[in-house]
Image: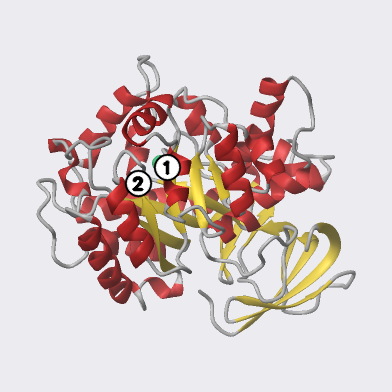
Amino acid sequence: MSGGRQRFHCEVALVEGRLAERVRVEVLDGAVVGIAAGVPPQSGDVVLTTVVPGFANAHSHAFHRELRGRTHASGGDFWQWRHRMYDVANRLTPDGYHLVAERVFTEMRDAGYTAVGEFHYLHHQPDGTPYGGHEMELALAAAAASAGVRLVLLDACYLSGGVNEPLREEQQRFGDGDAHRWLDRWHRLRDVLSGQGNGLVTLGAAIHSVRAVSRSDLAVIAGGLPREVPLHAHVSEQPAENQACLEAYGLTPIALLAEHGLVSGRFSAVHATHLSTGDISLLGEAGATIVMCPTTEADLGDGIGPAPELQAAGARLAIGSDQHVVIDPLEELSRLEFDQRLRLQRRGVFPPDTLWAAGTVSGYESLGLSGSLGSPPGLRVGEPWDAVEIDTTSARLRGVDPWQLPLAARACDVRATIVGGRLTRPGR
Ligand SMILES: [Zn+2]
């Protein structure tokens, strides 16, 4: 994060839900303290072209990047892909994890992601023995600080290999034994992480899924996790998860989580692909966030989730690159819309302001990084100076209405990324 006072001038900028021209942004210690539109640049300003808020990657597993380009050609399904993923998971040392994460976070930064929610479950040594000093978590924090992206470490409780099944051999390093011990480690980790990562790192929480955490352990988490902490969970990515949950508990995964009061405004359901109408109502009434991961869901053949129905019910939408077959916020956003056009056979399912919100403010809210709940997308006084400059003068984007950039731009159009006032250009 950059300290002191900085001033930027943007030819065009997205400010509180609308595009404005000739916008001057004043920044103090990495946060926006003043915005003025319709004004010329002054001497000493950093001059930028088209500027939009930074994108949030609300669901990432950094180490899945190692599978890119290696698992897409041979058919199979989610479960076969998962088997390959476990091979990678069990080879990682803390140093290796740091290296992989640093590269992935740098790729995200260059693509315009200014914040990432890392859904992390590689806690222990491959045989399940604790490292003792949070080595894997500190590796992620150091990687984010080095790459210069904001990290919310979503430390995941992962206790069982399936509904009422023990962890398998290849899952040993994920587990803490029970939810009490996960909570103990989570609280110790919070103390260790405070002060790490140049002010860019905070701790959130995750329930891996209802496959990995039993009903009784959900009750422990509901009672022991501080209420303000962002909480994420994989939900109903595959019909088989719904089936197993219904057979064991007579409830869908969302209904099971809601039974413990875990579906609330601080909750984010990742994927939420195969939902019942009751699930959609529960998520909407709670004002929960749905983290859609369109490129991953397409690659794994998961299906297309009911995003418009969820939004109509009251839920917010955010995006994640998940397994990183692609790291490109603009591609995720265009797919969010285009998948629904294919599913519903009509255009304009989501207006651009919904896509801007999904890419920016709703993702930040999902990660506990914004106090602008429900605000329109755009730069705003009081928020961190996290922003992206997009080159709209190139042959690719010449003539594009900036409002429609989520449907037309790609990560290759990102000219600069700013996180907490620190500006970097792709490849540097
Ligand atoms: Zn995931």
Along the line of sight, the residue nearer the viewer: 169 or 197:
169
The residue located at (45%, 69%) in the rendering is 200
Left or right of residue 222, residue 172 in this image: left
Q: Does the residue labelled 1 lie within 8 Å of ligand 1?
A: yes
216 versus 234 height, above or below: below
The number of callouts visible is 2
**Residue at mark 1 to residue at mark 2: CA–CA distance:** 6 Å
Task: Say which residue label 1 marks.
Answer: 234
Density class for disc 2 (Cα within 10 Å; few <14, some 14-19, many ≥20) is many
Is residue 251 something that shows in the picture?
Answer: yes
x%, y% of residue 31?
62, 76
- Asked whether the beta carbons under mark 1 and mark 2 sit within 8 Å of each other, the answer is yes
Along the line of sight, the residue nearer the viewer: 169 or 253:
253
User: Quadrant of residue 123 in the image?
Assistant: bottom left
Q: Which amino acid does label 1 sit on?
A: His
Element on which disc 1 rests: strand
Describe the colour scheme in one phrase. Answer: secondary structure
Residue at the extreme top: 75
Element on which disc 2 rests: loop
Q: Earlier in the sequence, mark 1 or mark 2?
A: 2
Q: Which amino acid does label 2 sit on?
A: His
Name the mark on residue 152.
none
x%, y% of residue 173?
17, 48
The residue located at (34%, 56%) in the rendering is 219
The residue located at (61%, 65%) in the rendering is 386
User: Quadrant of residue 252 in the image?
Assistant: top left
x%, y% of residue 169?
12, 37
375 versus 345 height, above or below: below
Name the mark on residue 208.
2
Which quarter of the rendered image does ligand 1 occupy? top left
Residue at the extreme bottom: 4
